Image (cartoon, rainbow, N blue to C red):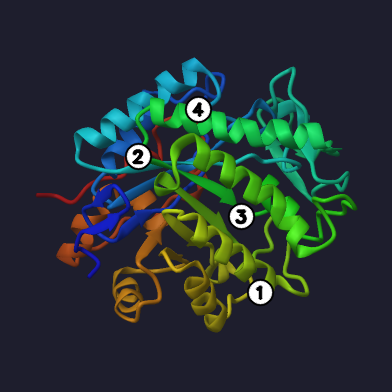
């Protein structure tokens, strides 16, 4: 099944293989995507679907050094290089929108941007800044209702720009401790208004973004990524987590989203995501379900045959193997990823991984 085509709404995918979103930090000039990034994604266009690295829909969301944005005309033009490259090779590509929220340091943001979050709780730990090395995260300003309305509008506007830039769709990043999950997770969200407290209230921000984005580009071109059992960026599981996310998935399915993409980082040391919960989440959503988490070709095939997912996402293996699909088909050895170059500028460990000899 892995190499068979798949129909994802209006998008015909060449196979069931998804390139997972992977932050690569190569947008060195004012967070504008560039020709090097277009080369990188074009090299990997044989995956059925590419989901880009996390891209901020707002100046406030540019939390990491050198991550791309999509909120101005220069960034639209920069991303057009990538979509043209992927489409010229027959691929399909969604852009992932990631607003980092409290996961930042002020140095990484443009001069007029702000560090924001649902509450004033600072994210634990430190992050890299090009200007001053490792720094503790900046204390966020709790978002007012006006701030929330503005952020929702930014996601919708960025989605329109994504279609203008040639993307086949959009993935909303509601996982890994970034802004949307900061609202979803009660360890971070300490609000007492209609965006905090109950699970229904904590889901509100995510659903407002989803509904605004649907109004902008349609549900068939919209996916979402969630990590209910993640621990990244000071989140972690909580009482009622399964019920909250099953309710969210049910609503998202009824809205007609293209897919639900579940993060499972247990292969990297995060808590195990219960198999029963995965099955219940898939059933609650009732539409295309992307499985992820430490898969190789054989385990991905097994998961598809067992209907544990409709598509399977691969991360580091595609990062290190531009011809990943061909290697899987041939049973060929895979390049090992060089994690020392994951977030460094330039082509090393980015566009210089070798393809198979022919």
Name the residue rendered at 45%, 26% in the picture: 33
* Sequence order check, earlier mark of 4 and 2: 4
* Sequence order check, earlier mark of 1 and 4: 4
Read off the residue under disc 4: 27
Q: Mark 3 or 2, which is nearer the eye?
A: 2
Gap between marks 4 and 3, in whole Å?
Answer: 22 Å
For numbered disc 4, what is the local secondary structure? loop
Depth order, front residue of 312/321 = 312
Q: Mark 4 or 3, which is nearer the eye?
A: 3
Q: Mark 4 or 2, which is nearer the eye?
A: 2
Gap between marks 1 and 3, in whole Å?
Answer: 15 Å
Gap between marks 3 and 2, in whole Å?
Answer: 21 Å
For numbered disc 1, what is the local secondary structure? helix
> Within 10 angstroms of label 3, few (less than 14), some, or many (20 or more) residues?
many
Gap between marks 4 and 2, in whole Å?
Answer: 21 Å
Read off the residue under disc 3: 175
Image vertical order of residue 123 relative to residue 84, above or below: below
Q: Mark 1 or 3, which is nearer the eye?
A: 1
* Sequence order check, earlier mark of 3 and 2: 2
* Residue 54 visible, this orientation: no
Depth order, front residue of 158/182 = 158
Contact between marks 1 and 3 (CB within 8 A): the answer is no
Read off the residue under disc 2: 168
Depth order, front residue of 247/1 = 247
Drawn side of residue 22 relative to residue 147, left or right: left
Gap between marks 1 and 4, in whole Å?
Answer: 37 Å
Name the residue rendered at 65%, 45% in the picture: 208
């Amino acid at each position: 099944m892995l190499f068979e085509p798949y129909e994802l709404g209006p998008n015909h995918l060449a196979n069931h293989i998804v390139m997972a979103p992977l932050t690569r930090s190569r947008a060195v000039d004012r967070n504008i995507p560039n020709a090097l990034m277009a080369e990188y994604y074009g090299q990997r266009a044989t995956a059925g679907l590419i989901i880009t690295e996390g891209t901020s829909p707002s100046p406030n969301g540019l939390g990491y050094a050198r991550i791309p944005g999509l909120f101005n005309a220069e960034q639209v033009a920069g991303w057009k290089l990538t979509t043209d490259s992927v489409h010229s090779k027959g691929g399909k590509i969604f852009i992932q929108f990631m607003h980092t929220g409290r996961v930042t340091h002020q140095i990484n943001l443009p001069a007029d941007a702000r560090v924001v979050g649902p509450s004033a709780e600072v994210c634990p730990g430190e992050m890299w800044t090009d200007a001053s090395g490792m720094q503790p995260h900046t204390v966020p300003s709790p978002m007012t209702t006006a701030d929330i309305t503005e952020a929702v509008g930014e996601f919708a506007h960025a989605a329109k720009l994504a279609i203008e830039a040639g993307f086949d769709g959009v993935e909303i990043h509601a996982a890994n401790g970034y802004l949307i999950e900061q609202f979803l997770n009660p360890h971070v969200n300490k609000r007492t208004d209609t965006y905090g407290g109950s699970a229904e209230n904590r889901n509100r921000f995510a659903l407002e973004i989803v509904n605004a984005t649907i109004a902008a580009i349609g549900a068939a071109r919209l996916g979402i990524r969630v990590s209910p059992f993640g621990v990244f960026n000071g989140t972690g599981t909580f009482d009622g987590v399964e019920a909250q996310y099953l309710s969210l998935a049910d609503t998202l399915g009824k809205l007609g989203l293209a897919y639900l993409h579940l993060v499972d980082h247990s292969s990297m040391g995060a808590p195990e995501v219960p198999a029963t919960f995965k099955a219940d989440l898939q059933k609650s959503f009732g539409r295309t379900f992307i499985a992820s988490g430490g898969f190789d070709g054989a385990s991905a095939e097994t998961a598809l045959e067992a209907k544990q997912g409709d598509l399977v996402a691969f991360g580091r293996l595609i990062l290190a193997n531009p011809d990943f699909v061909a290697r899987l088909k041939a049973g060929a050895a895979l390049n090992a990823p060089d994690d020392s170059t994951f977030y460094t500028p330039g082509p090393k460990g980015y566009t210089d991984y070798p393809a198979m000899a022919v």
